[in-house]
Amino acid sequence: MKRLLLAALLVAGCEPYFKPHIDSFTVDDANPPAGKVVHLSYSVRGADIVSIVPEPGEVTGSPVAVTPRGTTIYTLRAANPIGESKQDVMVTLQTDAAASITSFRLTPSQAPAGAQRTLTWNIKNGVSMILIGGDLGTVPIHSVGGLTVAPLVTTTYTLIATSGRAFTPPQVQGMAVARVVEPTAIAWFTATPPAILQGDAVTLRWDGSALSWSIAAGPTTTNLGVARLLLVRPAATTTYSLTGSGPGGAAGQQLTVTVTPRAGTKLVYTPPPSGSERLRLVADACPAPCTTITLRLLAAAPVGLRGVAIDLPLDASKVSLDPLTFSSALDAGKAVLGTGPLAGQLVLGAVKKGTGAAPAADKSLMGGEELAHFSVALQSLGGQGVVFDGAQAFTSFIQSASGRTPGGIAVGKLEAK
């Protein structure tokens, strides 16, 4: 008797025990001309409320008349206290031209397996549009939109847009290839030598599959492009972080250079030996401890000139140079520590100005007479070692009425000790 009563209650539908079921949801014309009324028909079981969005909203009977304003996805929703069911139907208006794909892009086109990419598109006059590829399968799309994909292997995505009736071509399509690349890797990263005395140099070298490189030491990051070598002079034990970037993402690796303290306490200048030079770089006497030294460019013998230039390689970590300490017997000039392409060079130049259209006349200097001077100051954190050495190759020239003569300038050795 109890079982019969329970069955009767269930049949009577006193309380729903399942969410609503949608048997069907259709449209009588899925590709109508603009302005035409279409009819949405549905069959639903077990629903207390039925609605269709974006219009007309809540409905009580089928079919329902609507006038699409453009390509529209209508969603039927059926609800009761247990839950909700929904189903879509697309209505695409006829157009007055064939379908065309304005844009179809994949960003980025190359990335590691599983990395997220973005597909975007813009289609004109398509009456039905689908996207095919990879784990997407086949999905209907709107004329303008985008979605995220994460292919595990190189995948081709194909967009197909169908034209309205009687338009040619009946279909157009676009393709975008998501190439899966190997993750960026660093093969090796070394320091030679790995341990130094303060003031010495270390060569960092590396290799790997990245397309660009950068190295960070503390808060400072140096972008190196495709270079695979960097000369550094750490003042203390330093950890260098190498980052390689490319289509396969980014990879990083660290190494530490150990520095034994050996701070410089004084500057010592050894003048160049005598020879056939026309100009000599000499230093003033410097009381101990010599932390600032004045260097003078003197005529070695009587000479006439209207310009002079020197590019002298030096360790800029060991000294500083105040441009205001520069003075010249010529009309204009400077002495600075170079930057950019001239980084790591002492750059000195002086020139005598011409008048009107005529070049400047040579300035005559007697032996021992000064052409220019400047001062450098010790940077103790740069450690001990050679600041510059004129016995090594450097660039210089003297300009006179007879032309430009390379060399002719003798330079000694400056050291931090």
Image (cartoon, rainbow, N blue to C red):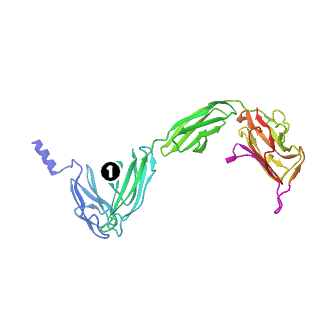
Residue 324 visible, this orientation: yes
Could you say which is closer to the camera, residue 106 or residue 396? 396
Q: Is residue 89 above or below residue 226?
A: below
The picture places residue 136, in percent across and down from the top left corner, at 34, 50
Q: Which residue is mark 1?
A: 137
Circle 1 SS class: loop
The picture places residue 27, in percent across and down from the top left corner, at 25, 62
Could you say which is closer to the camera, residue 22 or residue 20? 22
Q: Is residue 322 above or below residue 161?
A: above
Q: Is residue 262 above or below residue 362?
A: above
Q: Quadrant of the C terminus?
A: top right
**Would residue 203 appear left or right of 37 to someone viewing this image?**
right
Could you say which is closer to the camera, residue 244 or residue 154? 154
Name which residue lies at 80% across and 47% down: 326
Q: Quadrant of the N terminus?
A: top left
**Would residue 91 appear left or right of 349 to someone viewing this image?**
left
Residue 339 visible, this orientation: no
Q: Is residue 88 magenta?
A: no
The picture places residue 376, in percent across and down from the top left corner, at 78, 41
**Would residue 262 appear left or right of 374 to someone viewing this image?**
left
The picture places residue 402, in percent across and down from the top left corner, at 83, 53
**Part of the protein shown in magenta:** 336-361
Residue reaching furthest to the right: 366
Name which residue lies at 56% across and 43% down: 213
Rate crowding at label 1 as few (under 14), some (14 to 19) or many (20 or more) other CA atoms within 10 Å: few
